[in-house]
Amino acid sequence: ATASSALLYYTLQLAINTTVRGMTTTARVMVTEETFSCSDGMKLATRRWTNFSNANDHDQLPRRTRKILCLHGWLDNAASFNRLAPLLLDSSFSSPEATKIPTEIVALDFPGHGLSSHKSVDGPPQLLAEYVYYVAELIEALQWGKGNEGGTGTGVGDSRTVVGNIHSNAKHGDGGGVNTEKSSDNVGDNTNTDENRILLIGHSMGSGVSVILCAAFPEWFFSLVCLEGGLIARNANDASRHVRAACQRRLKSNRTLFPSSNNGSGSNGETTSPRAKIYGNLEQAIEARLSTTRRMPGDQFLSYEAARDMVLRATVPANAVSSSSHRADSEAVVFRHDPRLQWPSLQYYTREQVEAFFRDVNTSNIPVCFLSAADGWPSESWAESVIKDVLKPRHIKRLSGSHHFHADPDSVEAVVDEIFKFLEEHKL
């Protein structure tokens, strides 16, 4: 059975002043908020930036666009790309020919994060492979990765097994839906053209999801940018210990998190916990986010500006469950992320599995750019060595800044500069 996908558009035109490579410019950026309904009922929220004016009308999109998909880190959201995305659009891709290509950048709120809905009470709230599935549904709904050579389908390529059945009913034009349902069993037939492939940018946890995506579906992507990321590996001999810890935490927390479920009335898509902490105003919530960063390993820090961006998207008024952004800074707020995201995971990948993912990306010939921060998340020597020797990024650089160097105003320009160097060096 298929489910309908409602795309809700809230469009703003922003004149954004940016300084790139020592030159201040003003870019006209269209910012669009969209919500997609997945085949299992999950709601995925996205923020889209484009450098063309008709981005809110899918029937009028330019025939050829450069597509960039951004995946955020743990307990962050799409707003962590608020500075990176406009700079990428403003600078375009430096060469005179490339600047003529309209570009669209989409950042996803993973399930349980930002404005996306939460997993049901009976499902695992956070598994990287689950996130890969929802990104696959999003790519299908966006109609990215499809070929233009006369294929009969309109999803992420007719050459692969269906990853979800979805109808796209955009609220524009005549309101008609575009049926993107498909089914095919020809897995791995690489028929997509380069211009329809995606530049995938992942930060931290989003970088891990990105690696798995590129390993599983290499035909969708023309390059991968990992920001402060990779994949966390755990000792295979600790597997039972991890399951025990996850089960114990779940047993302890579920009764208080979901009191309505104790009498059999479960729910799907909860947006706030009934026991969520109330912050007296937005500033208190921002300070809580900054304090969390200071307690992270190493010498991490986060700018006030980046924290405010993410907290605005991550909170709702304390006296309402609405995700509306129209609220006063003095109003009491609660964080709306799924509290289960802070539980230990039921499943971690082993070193052998991480190496296998890295090897699959490398043998798929997807060019990789790997950027880390001098004061970022501490990494062990094994991880650094396997990234260098197995993933084999074509462009690898350590930059000044901390774990959110792509979101902080003092370091984002250097990140953008390195991404451009990578794209230019490899003619991407």
Image: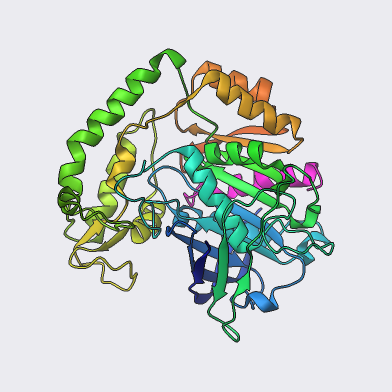
Q: Name the residue located 72 percent from the left edge and 30 percent from the top edge.
A: 362
**Residue 227: x %, y % from top left:** 56, 40
Residue 222 vs 94, above or below: the answer is above
Residue 339 vs 63, above or below: the answer is above
**Residue 23 visible in the picture:** no
**Residue 188 visible in the picture:** yes
State the image quarter where residue 24 is shown. Answer: bottom right
**Residue 235: x %, y % from top left:** 45, 16
Q: Name the residue located 41 percent from the left edge and 51 percent from the top edge.
A: 111
Q: Name the residue located 50 percent from the left edge and 68 percent from the top edge.
A: 4
Q: Name the residue located 51 percent from the left edge and 54 percent from the top edge.
A: 81
**Residue 311: x %, y % from top left:** 34, 56
Identify the residue at the far front of this view.
1
State the image quarter where residue 15 is shown. Answer: bottom right
Q: In the image shown, does 172 or 155 lie closer to the viewer? A: 155
Q: In the image shown, does 295 or 350 lie closer to the viewer? A: 350
Identify the residue at the far bottom of this view.
174
Residue 189 vs 391, above or below: the answer is below
Residue 25: in magenta span: no
**Residue 54: x %, y % from top left:** 64, 78
Would residue 261 be found to the left or right of residue 238 on screen? left
Residue 423: in magenta span: yes
Dominant secondary-structure state across the stretch colored magenta: helix
> What is the span of residues highlighted in magenta in the rendered image?
406-428
Q: In the image shown, does 72 or 160 lie closer to the viewer? A: 160
Would residue 15 be found to the left or right of residue 66 on screen? left
